[in-house]
Image (cartoon, helix red, strand yellow):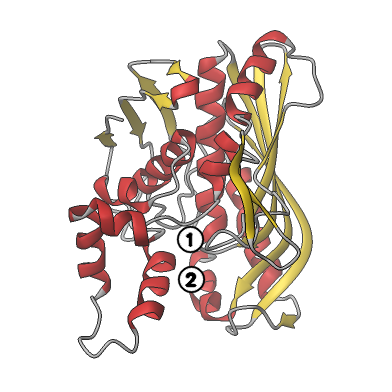
Amino acid sequence: MARINEEEISYLMLLSKLLKAALKDDRTGTGTSEIFGHQMRFDLSKGFPLLTTKKVHFKSIAIELLWFLKGDTNIRYLLQHGCTIWTEWRYKQYVKDYINDPLGYLTQQEFEQQILDSPVFAEKYGDIGKGYGHQWRNFGHNTECKYSGDGYPIGELTTVEGFDQISWVINEIKTNPDSRRLIVSGWNPHEVNQVDLPPCHTMFQFHVNEGKLSCQLYQRSADTFLGVPFNIASYALLTHIIALECGLTVGEFIWTGGCVHLYKNHFEQAKLQLTRSPRQFPKLVIKNKKSFDNMNSKILKLLTIILIHQLKQRLQYESIRRASWRTTL
């Protein structure tokens, strides 16, 4: 008899709970139901937590994670690999600049193509600011200038060197695995207003026990229908990658949410999802097991990730046994 997927059931129970929760206003004006504080656990040794009751785009998850690990903050890399999940934020800024231009402005599709075609345009409109890649790989980096009391710049620009948290935490896991300080923070209070969207997944902590690497994420703001399935799979993949680099196997991924919400315009989709029975999670196999070649130059060669489906992935439950893709950084 197949094992019941209790871990995905725990996610469905969260959806059900939110459908019954009190309504609350939110930043977007859409309206949400919300609870404060929730936790789910996933045993990565038994399967990869890619939800089976809705379609979750694994390629975008992996491309975005590699973008973070490169320390990149410009969407050009994402678009070069067919990932558009951050385009909306940059496009909004572009439209704001050109809304009153008598010649009009580009459509979002044209905007994406211009980012791809023009490095100069990409430099101006493609950078999201001091987001996850910056915080993970260059935390605190800044260029400063002293100002007089009248507000005029005085002296030369000075550079504050950033801190590479990913390199540091990998070294700590290898050399001090019993540490209770294996933490990476994406939240810098001085810089939360210098990015399109302040980090939702704000910090994560690793734990090593009996040769297994576990990871716990704290997510301050959790869009349960769209974002949380994506975040669960992303940090599960991150745990696999860091475990591989450190010569460990995977243990658990623990997801902890702060303001956990369901947008009102997702209520009907959530109800539909609750009518579906979860299948077993797929297995993740990483081929061409390359380590981080040089963490200081932020180069990661993860040439092929093969996700072996032992489930019917699409919403229509088409039969798909294997999905594979290749990316070269």
> Mark 2 sits on what residue?
272
Q: Residue at x 27, y 33 (%)?
A: 327
Q: Residue at x 23, y 85 (%)?
A: 104
Q: How many marks?
A: 2
Using the rendered view, name the quadrant where residue 37 is placed.
bottom right
Q: Amino acid at mark 2?
A: Leu
Q: Position of residue 143 (x, y in %)?
A: 58, 45
- Using the image, determine if residue 274 lies above or below residue 70: below
Frontmost residue, 307 versus 125: 125
> Mark 1 sits on what residue?
276
293 relative position to 141: left or right: left
State the separation of the CA atoms marked 2 and 1. 7 Å
Q: In this rendering, does residue 1 appear at all? A: no
Q: Residue at x 66, y 74 (%)?
A: 19
Using the rendered view, name the quadrant where residue 207 is placed.
top right
Mark 2, residues whose alpha carbon is within 10 Å: few (<14), some, or many (≥20)? Answer: few
On-image quarter of the C terminus:
top left
Q: In this rendering, does residue 42 appear at all? A: yes
Which element is circle 2 on?
helix
Using the rendered view, name the quadrant where residue 85 is placed.
bottom left
- On residue 129, the disc is none
244 relative position to 224: left or right: left
Q: Residue at x 79, y 26 (%)?
A: 181
Frontmost residue, 82 versus 266: 82
Q: Are marks 2 and 1 in contact (CB under 8 Å)?
A: yes
Residue farthest toward the right in the current orientation of the protein: 180
Mark 1, residues whose alpha carbon is within 10 Å: few (<14), some, or many (≥20)? Answer: few
Q: Position of residue 259 (x, y in %)?
A: 73, 64
- Using the image, determine if residue 248 lies above or below residue 270: above
Q: Amino acid at mark 1?
A: Arg
222 relative position to 128: left or right: right
Frontmost residue, 257 versus 135: 135
